[in-house]
Image (cartoon, rainbow, N blue to C red):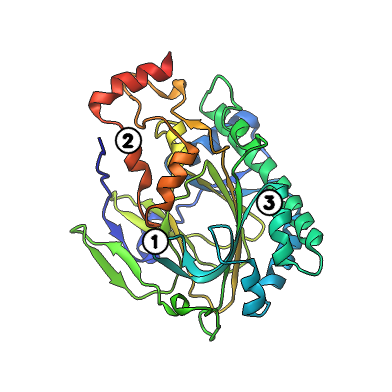
């Protein structure tokens, strides 16, 4: 049984969130108040917002600076040189086309599997002069950011009171982890920038939102990456000093509004993913977000998507299921969820397809707790 989603009314402009304040929680990862306080703060931010800004995170600036330099050099290449690393399948180099179902945005990107072997294979078409140079830069960055992701997931486990606080981090440290690294380059909006490699690159992106009647309405804007949630467990985003990222958060009236996330190149922005929402039986919320590419300077962002192995069975942890909070989602594998994701448009609330109905709750909940 598919349970229809109940989406609050959405307002189109980030300016509408003024009464809500910034709406973006900040977490000091150096734990000035002790680890217990930090774990509770991380859990609260993920439960209430599905998103937070991590500062004093311990990731040295070197790996990030080297990766930014390497990827900026790649995006500065002539179109035919970049095409050697594409087309995306979905991995590789892509221009404007996102996924396989007609989504598009004002960007070009590299999408890489995070395993060293996969990086080495793709590096041959990205840095033809010295593939090992690119591989080393990517692997150093992935290693540093994966450790931060594990630290955050362990803090979440502690903050939620799990019997094994490492329940989440163990899923992404497996040697068969399906984690990805995505580097997005958004060209300046106020200059003519030729990304066009084929007819699809001549498409103009339009904002699609819902009005009070639940109908789609359009408003002109330069969409860099359309509204979506991340399907994996957790995502760690780092960008340069150019604004563009927006997250969808409820205001005091219960309406969802787009909140502009102030740029901070020294911080990581942490997103709860769909799998983490399912694993916690909905206690943590997978946040919806988008990028508006309207700046007159290029925006470069790098996102590490922490994911489990494809065969991993995703089901709500026993501690999250109670009589008052029955199991919300049926068990599924990451491979199954990923296949479903690739069959849908970017904005689809895909986790709704895995919800259980009242008739199924007693069986699913009982099975998970035995």
Q: Residue furthest top?
A: 370
Q: Disc 3 to disc 1, how far (Cα)?
A: 25 Å
Q: Nearer the viewer, residue 137 or 7?
A: 137
Return the mark for residue 355: 2
Residue 238 seen in the current view = yes
In the figure, is residue 250 to the left or right of 286?
Answer: left
Q: Secondary structure at mark 3?
A: helix
Q: Quadrant of residue 92?
A: bottom right
Quarter of the picture holding the C terminus = top left
In the figure, is residue 45 to the left or right of 326?
Answer: right
Query: Residue at coordinates 32% horizontally, 50% vertically from top-left?
Result: 252
Residue 154 seen in the current view = no
Image x and y of residue 328, in percent: 34, 31
Q: Nearer the viewer, residue 184 or 128?
A: 128
Q: In the rendered structure, which disc, 3 or 1, sits on the residue that comes first in sequence?
A: 1
From the viewer's perspective, is the residue at label 3 or at label 2 nearer? 3
Query: Residue at coordinates 42% horizontally, 20% vertically from top-left?
Result: 368
Image x and y of residue 276, in percent: 48, 37
Q: Residues within 10 Å of mark 3 (few under 14, many from 20)?
A: few
Return the mark for residue 118: 3
Q: Disc 3 to disc 2, how far (Cα)?
A: 34 Å
Q: Secondary structure at mark 1?
A: loop
Q: Which residue is mark 1?
A: 101
From the viewer's perspective, is the residue at label 1 or at label 2 nearer? 1
């Amino acid at each position: 049984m598919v349970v229809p989603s109940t989406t609050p009314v959405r307002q189109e402009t980030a300016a509408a969130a003024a009464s809500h304040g910034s709406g973006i929680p900040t977490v000091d990862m150096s734990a000035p108040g002790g680890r217990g306080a930090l774990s509770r703060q991380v859990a609260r931010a993920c439960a209430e917002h599905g998103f937070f800004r991590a500062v004093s995170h311990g990731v040295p600036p070197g790996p990030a600076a080297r990766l930014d330099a390497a990827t900026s050099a790649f995006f500065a290449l002539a179109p035919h040189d970049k095409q050697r690393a594409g087309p995306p399948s979905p991995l590789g180099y892509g221009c404007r086309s996102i996924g396989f179902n007609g989504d598009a945005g004002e960007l070009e990107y590299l999408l890489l599997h995070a395993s060293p072997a996969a990086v080495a294979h793709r590096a041959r078409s990205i840095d033809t002069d010295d593939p090992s140079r690119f591989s080393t830069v990517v692997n150093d960055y992935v290693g540093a950011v994966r450790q931060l992701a594990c630290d955050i997931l362990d803090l979440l486990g502690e903050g939620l009171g799990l019997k094994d606080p490492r329940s989440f981090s163990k899923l992404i440290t497996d040697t068969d982890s399906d984690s990805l690294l995505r580097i997005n380059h958004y060209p300046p909006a106020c200059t003519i920038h030729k990304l066009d490699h084929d007819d699809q690159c001549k498409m103009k992106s339009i904002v699609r939102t819902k009005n009070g009647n639940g109908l789609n309405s359009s408003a002109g804007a330069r969409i860099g990456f359309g509204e979506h949630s991340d399907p994996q467990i957790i995502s760690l985003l780092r960008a340069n000093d150019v604004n563009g990222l927006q997250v969808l958060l409820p205001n005091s009236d219960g309406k969802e509004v787009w909140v502009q996330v102030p740029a901070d190149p020294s911080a990581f922005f942490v997103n709860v993913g769909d799998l983490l929402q399912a694993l916690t039986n909905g206690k943590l919320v997978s946040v919806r977000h988008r990028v508006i590419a309207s700046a007159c300077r290029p925006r470069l962002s790098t996102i590490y998507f922490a994911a489990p192995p494809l065969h991993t069975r995703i089901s709500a942890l026993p501690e999250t299921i109670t009589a008052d909070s029955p199991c919300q989602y049926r068990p599924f594998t990451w491979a199954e969820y990923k296949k479903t994701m690739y069959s849908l448009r970017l904005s689809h609330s895909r986790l709704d397809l895995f919800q259980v109905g009242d008739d199924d709750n007693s069986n699913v909940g009982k099975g998970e707790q035995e």
